[in-house]
Amino acid sequence: MNQNLTLLQSAIEAGKRKDAVALTRSLLDEGMAPLDVVEQALVPGMSVIGEKFKRNEVFVPEMLIAARAMKECMVLLEPLLVAAGVKPKHTAVIGTVQGDLHDIGKNLVAMMLKGANFAVHDLGTNVPTEKFVEAAREHGAELVCLSALLTTTMPAMREAVGVIRAAALPKVKILVGGAPITQEFCNEIGADGYSPDAASAVDKAKEVLSA
Amino acid sequence: MNGYERYFATLDGGTPDHPARTPILMRWAAEHIGQAYGAFVSDHRVLVEANLRCARDLGIDQVSAISDPLRETAGFGGKVAIHPQTGASCEEPPLAAALDLALLQRPDPASSLRMRDRVEAVRLFKAKVGGEYSILGWVEGPLAEAADLRRMDNLFMDLFDGDEEVAALLDVCTDVAIDFARAQVEAGADTIGVGDAAASQISADLYEEWVWPREKRLVEAIHAMGARVKLHICGNITHLLPGIARLGLDVLDVDHLVDLATVRAAVGPKVALAGNVDPVKGVMQARPDAIRTAVAACRERAAGPFLVNAGCEIPAGTPLENLRAFCQPL
Ligand code: B12
C-alpha cells in the first residue's frame, strides 16, 4: 500500500490538518484517483477515530479536529470528484428536532456520515418537522437522521417520524438517536433504525439503506 | 436542625439529623408556582419565590440562584433572548465567527442586567431566609463560559490549535467568574456553585492543561472570600477525577453516569458528594418507593459526607409526589 495513504490516514486520525492536506496534494500529484484517496485514507481514518470515541479512548475535541482535517482535504478532492462525475453513494438530511438546541452529538453523526462518503445536508437545531420533509424532497435524500437530547423533545421526534411517513417519500429511511433515545423508542415511533453513537450510526445507516 | 445547620453539619464533619437535600430546580420550580420559565430566568423575584415555595413545600435545605447558563454571556455583550417556555438562548454567540477578545464587553456584576438580577436574587434570599436555609450562588466555570461565548465545537478545536487567544479567553472567563462570585458572596451566598458542564466532553489531558489551573484559581478565590465551593459538571467525569480531587472542593455534584464509590475513593473522605439518582429514569419516571430506595442507595455508595441530589436538574414535568419522595428525610 502507498506509504502516503497510510500517513494520510494517520494524519486524519490525529486531526493534523496541515499534514493531511499536504499528503492529499502529494497523492493527487502522484496520480492517485481522488475517489481512492477518499476511500482508502479519509474514510478509514474517520472510522478508526469514531471507534475510539465509542470506546471512550478519545473525546469530542479529537473527533472534531479529525473531521476538520477531513473537511480541508475534501476542499481539494471535491471539485475533482465532481469533475470525474463521482457522486456520493447516499444522500442524508440531518437535524435536531424542534425545541431542542443540543447539536454536538448530531454534528458528530453528520461528520461520520460525511467521513463515510455520504452527502449530508445539516438543517441545524430546533428544526420544524416540515423542514425535514422539504429538505428530503429538495435534495432527494434517502436518509433522514433525527437527533433529540431532551425527554421533553422526544414527542417532537415521534411527530417528525409521523409527518415524514405521511409525506409521499417512499424510499426515505429514518434514523434516530440521542442520549435518551432507545431501540424500544425507535420501534415504538416507527423509525427504521437507532444507534447509540456516531460510529455505529454509519453502520446502521448502511444497514437500513440496503434493507 | 434547620436547613442551614443541616447543610453545614454535612460540610463541616458534624452529624446532620438526616442528609440535607439540595436538588437542582429550575424549570420545575417555575412550574411549581405556575410561572413561565422565562420569568424565572429574568426576574429575581420570581426565582426567589419559586425557590422558597419549593423549599417549604418539599423540605429542601438550600435555596439557589441557578437559572440558566447565560448570565455572564449577556454581560459579555452576547445577545440573549428570553422565551417564555425555553428560557434564555443566545443564537449567535459573540465569538462564534472569530476568536477575538476585542469583540467582548467586560461584564460588571453591578451593572450588567442579567448578572445584577442574580445578585439581587441572592440579596433577597439573604433578607428573607438568611440563616434558615443555605444560600447557593452560581457562576459559569471557565470552560463552560468560554464555550457559551465561542460555541463549544469552535472552542474545542481552539484548544488543539493552542494559541494565546484561547488562553486569554479562558483567563478572562475565570476573572469574570471571580468577580461574579464576589458580588454574590457579598450579597449573602454561603456557597458558590460552579457549572463547568463542557468539561465532561474533553480528555483528562486537555482538562489538566487548560481547565484545571483556572478552576483551581476560581476555587481558591472563592475560599478567600469566605464561601464554600460546589462544582457541577454534567455528564461522565470519571476520567477527570484525579484532577478534580486536587481542586479543594467542598461539594462535588455527581451525575448519574458516574459511580459514587469511585468518586469517594478518588476525592477522599472530606468532600461532600451530591447525587446521583438519574434525573429522568430515577426521579421523573420512577415510582415514589423506588425513588426512596435509590436515594438511600446513593447515601450508601457515597460513604461519607452526602447531600441528596439527582445527577442533574430535576426535569420539568416530574410529578410532585416523586419529588416529595425524593426529599423525604432519610
Ligand atoms: C452540552 C449540553 C448542553 C449544552 C448544549 C450545547 C450544544 N451546542 O449542543 C447547553 C448548555 C446549551 C444545554 C442546554 C440544556 N440542557 Co443540556 N446537556 C448537555 C450535556 C452536558 C452533554 C450533551 C452532549 O453534547 N453530549 C456529547 C454528545 C457527543 O453525546 P450525544 O449528544 O448523546 O450524542 C451521541 C449519541 O447520542 C448519538 N446521537 C446523537 N444524535 C444522534 C442522531 C442519530 C440519528 C443517531 C443515529 C445517533 C445520534 O451519537 C452521538 C455521538 O456518539 C448533557 C449531559 C450528558 N452527559 O449527556 C446535558 C443534557 C442533555 N441537557 C439536559 C437539559 C435538561 C438541558 C436544558 C433543559 C437545561 C436548562 N435548564 O437550561 C437545556 C435545554 C436547551 C434546549 N432547548 O435544548 C439534560 C436532559 C435531560 C433529559 N433527558 O431531558 C442532560 C442529559 C443533562 C442532565 N443530566 O439533566 N445542554
Image: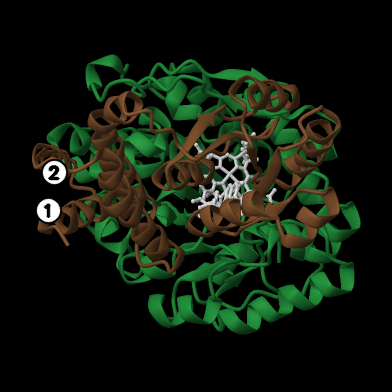
What is the x, y in percent for residue B217? Answer: 26, 50
Of A53 and B247, the residue lying toward us? A53
Of A175 and A77, the residue lying toward us? A77
Label 1 to label 2: alpha-carbon separation: 7 Å
- Regarding residue B224, the answer to whether it shows in the image is no
Which numbered disc covers residue A27?
2
The answer to which quarter of the image holds residue A135 is top right
Amino acid type shown at disc 2: Leu
Report which colour depicts chain B: green
Amino acid type shown at disc 1: Asn
The answer to which quarter of the image holds residue B64 is top right
Which numbered disc covers residue A90?
none
Q: Label 2 lies in what chain?
A: A
In the drawing, does residue B104 fall left or right of residue B304?
left
What residue does disc 1 label? A4
**CB under 8 Å between callouts 1 and 2?**
yes
Mark nearer the N terminus (1 vs 2): 1
Is label 1 in a helix, a strand or a loop? helix
The residue located at (17%, 62%) in the rendering is A1
